[in-house]
Amino acid sequence: MSRAPVLLVGFAATNQAVCAQLAERGHAVVAADDAPGEQARRQAAAMGIDFVERPAVEDWPALVAGARLVVPTPGLPESHPSLSAAAAADTPVASELDLAQRWDARPTLAVTGTNGKTSATLLAAAMLDASGIEVKVAGNTETPLVEAIRDDRPAAFVVEASSFRLGHSRSYRPAVGAWLNFAPNHLDVHASLASYRAAKAALWTRADEHAVSVVNRDDPVVVAHAPDQGRVLTFGVGEGDFRVGGEALWAWSEKLADIEDLHRSGPHELSNHLAAAAVAMAAGAKLEGVREALLAWTGLPHRVALVAEHNGVRFFDDSKATTPHAVRAAVCSVGQSSGQTDGRTVLIAGGRNKGLELGPMAEVADRLRSVVAIGEAAAEVEEVFAPSCPVSVAQSMEEALEQAAAMARSGDAVLLSPGCASFDWYGSYAERGDHFSRLARELIGGSP
C-alpha cells in the first residue's frame, strides 16, 4: 500500500466521514480547507490528521503532488485550483460515492435530477420499507454514503445523488439509477450548463448489462442520455412503463393508486411518485408496499406546502424552489391545489441568484395576479415579470408577505417560490420557509 496520503479538499461533514473511514483502513490523510470553521479544526485535531487552513492558490500543486488520491468535498466548484492541480499531476480524483462503493458491495439505488430528488428518494425508501426490504437513505442528506455503510442491517442504500457528488465520481455505478428531470442550476459551482448536464449524466455513464436505468419520458435531455446498456424503465405523466392514465397511477398494467386518494398530486409530484415507484419496484418492492407508501405520503416541508388559509386565500411555502424550473412547477401545482378557476397566484420570488437565467419564470406570468420581488435578485425578478404583470419590491419577508396578502383576492394563492438561494437573508431554505410560514400564520391571526 502506498504511504502517500489521501488529500481531502474541504473538511465538512462528508469529508469528515471519509476521513474516519480512511483512518480505520490504515490510510494517511491530509485535509485542506479554504474557510474552516471551529468544528472542522476540532475534528481534525481529534482525528490526528494534518490540517492545512486557507491554502493559497500556489500551494495546491505541492499538496496534490504529495497525495495519491484527491477527494473533493461535495459542492467544490469545478474551477477550484485543487482540481486543475490534480489534472496537471495526473493524481486520481474520487467522490465519496466512489469510495463507499469500493468499500461496500451492497447495491445502491440512486436518484438525481434538478428538482424532486429528496422527495423521490424518501418515497422510494418508504415503498421498499413497506415491502419488507430494509434500506437506508444516504448521499445528499444528513448521512453521507460513506457513513451509511457502517450500518450492516440495510440490504441496499437509496442515494440522493446530487451533481455535486456525481460530478466528481470516477467509478460509481448504481444498481438502479433514476434521472428525474433537467433544468439549469448550480452554475455557481459547475463551469457551464454543459458541465452540469454531464455531471447528471454521470449517473449512467458506467451502466453495464446488470444496471437498471429509470428514465423520464417527458424530459428530452434525460431521454437523450438514456444508456444503451442494461434494463431501461420509463416513467411519464402521459406515457411510460410507469404512467398516469384514467386519473390513476399505473405500473405497466397494474394500478398503483387513484390520484384522488393521494395527498400530493401536482403534475411534478405525480412524476416524482412514478419515478419512486419505478426505483422501488426495480429493487424488489411489492405492488402493495408501493401502494401503501403512496397513500401515506404527505410530502416534505417547504415543497408547495399549504401553511395557512384565510378569507379564501391559501398561503404556500415552496422555499425549496431555488430554480426557475421549480417555480414554474410550483405555480402550476398551486393552481391545481387551490382549485383555482378565476383565482390567480401572488408570487414571492427572489433571493441570491445561483448564476441562472431567471427569464423562464415568465412562462407562468399568465397565471399570476402579481409578483413581490425580494432579496439580492429583486431587480432581476422585476425585470423578468414587469412586462407581463404587476411587480413590487419588498425589503424584508415581513414586507413581502404584507404586500402579497394585500394584493390577493378570495380564491387566490400566495406562494413563496423564490427561484433563488436563501443565503442573502437566511442561513438555509428551511429557515426562509419557516419564517414565511410563521409570518403567514401571524398575519391571519393564527388561523389553521
Image (cartoon, rainbow, N blue to C red):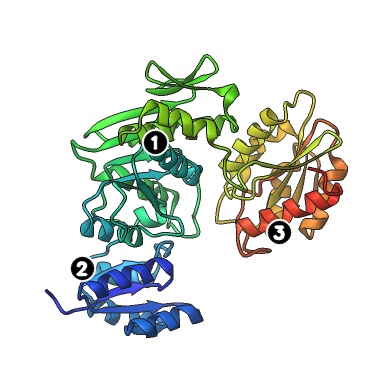
Across and down, in percent, residue 63 comes to 29, 80
Across and down, in percent, residue 338 comes to 72, 30
Q: Residue at x 40, y 46 (%)?
A: 197
Give the residue type that dot 1 points to. Val
| Secondary element at tag 1 | helix
Give the residue type that dot 2 points to. Asp
**Mark 1 crowdedness (10 Å alpha carbons): few <14, some 14-19, many ≥20:** many
Q: Residue at x 31, y 33 (%)?
A: 282
**Mark 2 crowdedness (10 Å alpha carbons): few <14, some 14-19, many ≥20:** few
Cα separation, mark 2 vs mark 3, equals 43 Å
Q: Nearer the viewer, residue 284 or 410?
A: 284
Q: Furthest residue to the left?
A: 1
Say which mark, if any, is on residue 222.
1
* Residue 84 showing in the rendered view: no
The part of the image, by quadrant, that contains residue 275 is: top left
Across and down, in percent, residue 8 comes to 33, 73
Cα separation, mark 1 vs mark 3, equals 32 Å
Q: Nearer the viewer, residue 370 or 180?
A: 180
Across and down, in percent, residue 320 comes to 59, 49
| Secondary element at tag 2 | loop
Say which mark, if any, is on residue 375.
3
First-in-chain label (1 vs 2): 2
* Residue 31 showing in the rendered view: yes
Q: Which residue is mark 2?
A: 90
Q: Residue at x 43, y 68 (%)?
A: 13
Q: In screen coordinates, is 265 left or right of 86?
A: right
